Amino acid sequence: ASTQSDRSGDSARFIADHVIGLPRSGIRDFFAIVAQMPQAISLGIGEPDFVTPWHIREAAIYALERGKTSYTDNMGLIGLRREISSYVERDFHVSYSPEKEVLVAVGVSEALDLALRAIVNPGDKVLFHQPCYVSYSPSIKLTHGVAVPIPTSDEDAFALNPQKLRECWEPGCKVLVLNFPTNPTGGTVDRKTLEEIAAFAKEKDLLVLSDEIYAELTFEGEHVSIASLPGMRERTIFLHGFSKAYAMTGFRIGYACGPAPLIEAMMKVHQYSMLCAPILSQEAATEALRNGQSAMEKMRDQYRDRRDFLVARFNEAGLKCHLPRGTFYTFADIRATGLDEMTFAKKLLSEEEVAVVPGTAFGESGKGFIRASFSTSFNRLREAADRIGRFAERHTS
Ligand code: PLP
């Protein structure tokens, strides 16, 4: 007879099919190896190397001292929602009611998940441009949607080409996920291209989920939100957060702004799952919006200098690299070495102890590329660039 412990051995049989079907993140496996190598220089990370500015941390400490340890309104603290509403109106030129059209979530990650869960019926198709943030495709699949990637390419500097969008569209597409500036390529689109994308969204009646988490880390040119274009507000959910620009990844605060019925639908899911975002983090985020602008701009200026340095060094090494117009990532073409991206990343790690991410971790169209992040101090970046230069020379015939 089988005993309790016999049966616990095959507990994997309880796991749902849609989870078994999810790929393991290639980045996780790779960085498990990097974690064992403390001497390695990692250009793999997708988060700021800066510590959250002190006055923002202090706001969390002060809130704790005042005994702010409760749940908040499901939508988030009204003071924070008011700050978000003013900020989005001032910098993104779209107006949202803090009472009904702003929802505070546990990072853009939760906001994106809520939007998909509130919008996608089983079998609905969701378009998104690729290479892209690793979570998009799994998040779509977890909501039983069908992921429809739109490849972007080197020739377009990894900006979404509206013609490609048209070619990839198929009947049953309901949602278009956009991310400008883009993780992992640093690509973005100009106003004219965004207008063409918006016209297509209207033509095909698509809802747009616009993940603008890197908006403040735009180095040149204006950042335009698709939500601000004529007729787009009513079919766009604007997603933004504090992780990147304010170096607040661990606080886990993001938000969604959109037409009241859509935010209400997201709120329904949120109130039965997360309830609310942590109160201390919401207090810190409020401070970030009230007084964090200059600290944020200083970090951005440092990213810009590091970007210029790293891009120049990649190009000198024969690894062609577009100038990313935003984010803290470079996406370098490694085809000159004759190595595929996974072999390149593994060999670079074992021979020179520098970690980068293979481009295919972000989708098939990342083939032949690697992502290197410049959220690392200048000293370490300089050392990494020397090592990459040596490596490229050795492997380029
Ligand atoms: N969206 C993009 C494009 C990202 O690159 C990331 C993190 O790397 C996120 C969302 C997740 O952000 P958050 O920390 O707010 O959940």
Image (tube, grey):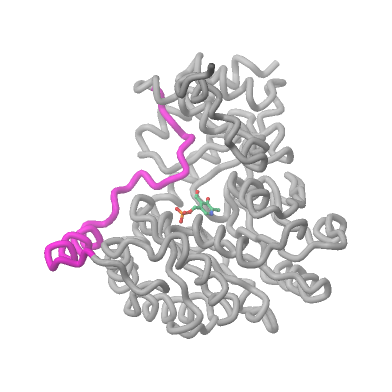
Query: Is 90 rendered above or below residue 295?
Result: below
Quarter of the image for the N terminus: give it. Answer: top right
- Front-most of 371 and 145? 145
Q: Residue at x 21, y 62 (%)?
A: 55
Point out the image quarter for the C terminus: top right
Q: Residue furthest left?
A: 65
Which residue does the image show at 35% across and 55% down from the upper left?
Answer: 248
What span is colored magenta in the figure? 40-69
Tell me if I can see residue 359 in this picture: no
Left or right, 246 with reference to 148: left
Q: Position of residue 237 (x, y in %)?
A: 59, 71
Furthest residue toward front:
1
Residue pictured at 44% horizontal, 80% vertical: 85
Q: Is residue 364 above or below residue 391?
A: below
Q: Position of residue 73 (x, y in %)?
A: 36, 74
Residue drawn where x is 61% and y is 61% of the image? 117
Q: Position of residue 396 (x, y in %)?
A: 67, 19
The foreground one among 181 and 139 is 139
| 382 lies left or right of 397 | left
9 in magenta: no
**Left or right placement of residue 180 versus residue 355 in this view:** right
Q: In the image, is residue 47 part of the stretch drawn in magenta?
A: yes
The image position of residue 380, as x and y in percent, is 37, 32
Q: Nearer the viewer, residue 172 or 84?
A: 172
Q: Is residue 219 in view from this perspective?
A: yes
Q: What is the quadrant of residue 201 in the picture?
A: bottom right
Q: How many numbered badges does the structure rendering display?
A: 0
Q: Is residue 189 left or right of residue 303?
A: right
Locate residue 339: give its quadrant. top right
